[in-house]
């Protein structure tokens, strides 16, 4: 095994420096390396995060690494992610990465952008929002559509409120289930997309959420005039090695960990939602 491959398969130990609860089952963790850190990741890429004695999980960046720290937002849905969400400052994990193809945000410069997030799907899109806000003059109209089961399931709620009131992008939020303190929209994400006006033939869409949501969103965007290669989704299915070697994330001829996780709808459309590939 080559030295490069060995390095990519060896976790780099990191210390937890903060664990912030986002929702009842979701937390944002910030890590710092004990020694030399990982290479700097980009929007949409992911790390494999190792919980000692349990296993690894692929988690996208929820903030582009700054000052050698790494930020991931994790939803507790399995044994590994539950263990990661339970970590406290001072505890340790192993990180490998960064892996995969990220959001091609530079190619969207000068165009309208539509971002669509379902629940925890906002986490991989959050670095894109940061990039847009930091370089707002490089992009035309920007719309962020957020869907969640309830208002309690929207991560980064304070930050989303700042985006919404800041005037630099349009934020639309909808929830599946109404509740007493929610006075916003109730319904599915595609209902909100009908209200988004698209008049730039080069518009770019970036979508992250449950696969069934992404499938309907992409179809609606395509029907509204988006070019299929300008519709981008991120897929995190069964990834294990991060290097395209083990085959666990293979969908047809594609390896999600190397050809993705971000893929355009031309490539992802025939694969998304097909369980047996």
Image (cartoon, rainbow, N blue to C red):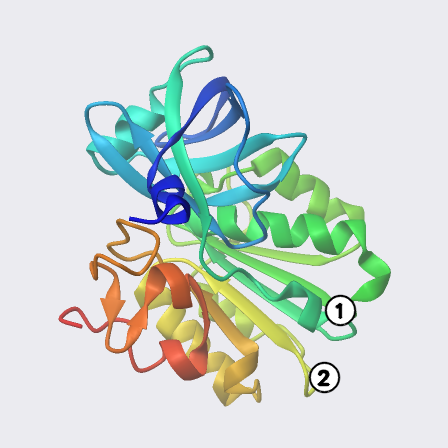
Per the image, the residue denoted by label 1 is 141
Q: Residue at x 22, y 37 (%)?
A: 78
Corner quadrant of residue 136: bottom right
Per the image, the residue denoted by label 2 is 200
Q: Nearer the viewer, residue 148 or 40?
A: 40
Is residue 141 among the parts visible in the rendering? Answer: yes
Q: Is 204 drawn above or below residue 167 in the view shown?
A: below
Q: Residue at x 58, y 53 (%)?
A: 43
Query: Would residue 265 appear left or right of 203 to someone viewing this image?
Result: left
Is residue 188 among the parts visible in the rendering? Answer: no
Q: Position of residue 19 (x, y in %)?
A: 47, 21
Q: Is 49 drawn above or below residue 121 in the view shown?
A: above
Element type where label 2 sits in the image: loop
Alpha carbons under labels 1 and 2: distance apart: 9 Å
Q: Nearer the viewer, residue 170 or 61?
A: 61
For disc 1, the neighbor class at 10 Å (few under 14, some 14 to 19, many from 20) is: some
Q: Nearer the viewer, residue 262 or 101?
A: 101
Corner quadrant of residue 143: bottom right
Q: Residue at x 45, y 10 (%)?
A: 90
Query: Would residue 11 appear left or right of 224 to someone viewing this image?
Result: left
Could you tell me if the residues under marks 1 and 2 are in contact, i.e. CB atoms within 8 Å? yes
Query: Would residue 270 appear left or right of 265 to someone viewing this image?
Result: left
Element type where label 1 sits in the image: loop
Corner quadrant of residue 255: bottom left
Q: Mark number for residue 209?
A: none
Q: Position of residue 12 (x, y in %)?
A: 42, 29
Q: Position of residue 230 (x, y in %)?
A: 57, 79
Kindly give the residue lying farthest to the right in the view shown.
137
For disc 2, the neighbor class at 10 Å (few under 14, some 14 to 19, many from 20) is: some
């Amino acid at each position: 095994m080559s030295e490069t491959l060995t390095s990519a398969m060896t976790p780099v130990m990191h210390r937890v420096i903060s664990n912030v609860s986002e929702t009842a089952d979701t937390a944002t963790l910030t890590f710092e390396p004990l020694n030399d850190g990982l290479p700097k990741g980009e929007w949409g890429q992911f790390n494999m995060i190792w919980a000692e004695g349990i296993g690894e999980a692929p988690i996208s960046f929820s903030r582009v690494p700054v000052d050698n720290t790494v930020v991931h937002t994790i939803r507790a849905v399995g044994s590994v992610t539950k263990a990661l969400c339970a970590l406290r400052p001072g505890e340790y994990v192993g990180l490998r990465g960064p892996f995969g193809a990220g959001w091609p945000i530079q190619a969207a410069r000068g165009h309208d952008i539509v971002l669509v997030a379902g629940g925890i799907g906002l986490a991989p899109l959050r670095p894109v929002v940061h990039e847009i806000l930091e370089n707002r003059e490089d992009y035309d109209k920007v719309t962020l559509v957020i869907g969640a089961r309830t208002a309690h399931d929207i991560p980064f709620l304070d930050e989303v409120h700042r985006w919404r009131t800041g005037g630099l992008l349009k934020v639309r939020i909808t929830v599946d289930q109404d509740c007493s303190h929610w006075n916003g929209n109730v319904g599915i994400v595609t209902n909100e997309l009908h209200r988004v006006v698209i008049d730039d033939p080069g518009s770019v869409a970036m979508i992250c959420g449950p696969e069934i949501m992404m499938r309907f969103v992409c179809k609606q965007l395509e029907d509204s005039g988006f070019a299929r290669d300008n519709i981008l989704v991120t897929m995190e299915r069964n990834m294990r090695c991060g290097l395209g070697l083990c085959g666990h994330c293979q969908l047809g001829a594609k390896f999600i960990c190397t050809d993705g996780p971000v893929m355009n709808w031309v490539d992802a459309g025939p694969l998304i939602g097909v369980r047996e590939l």
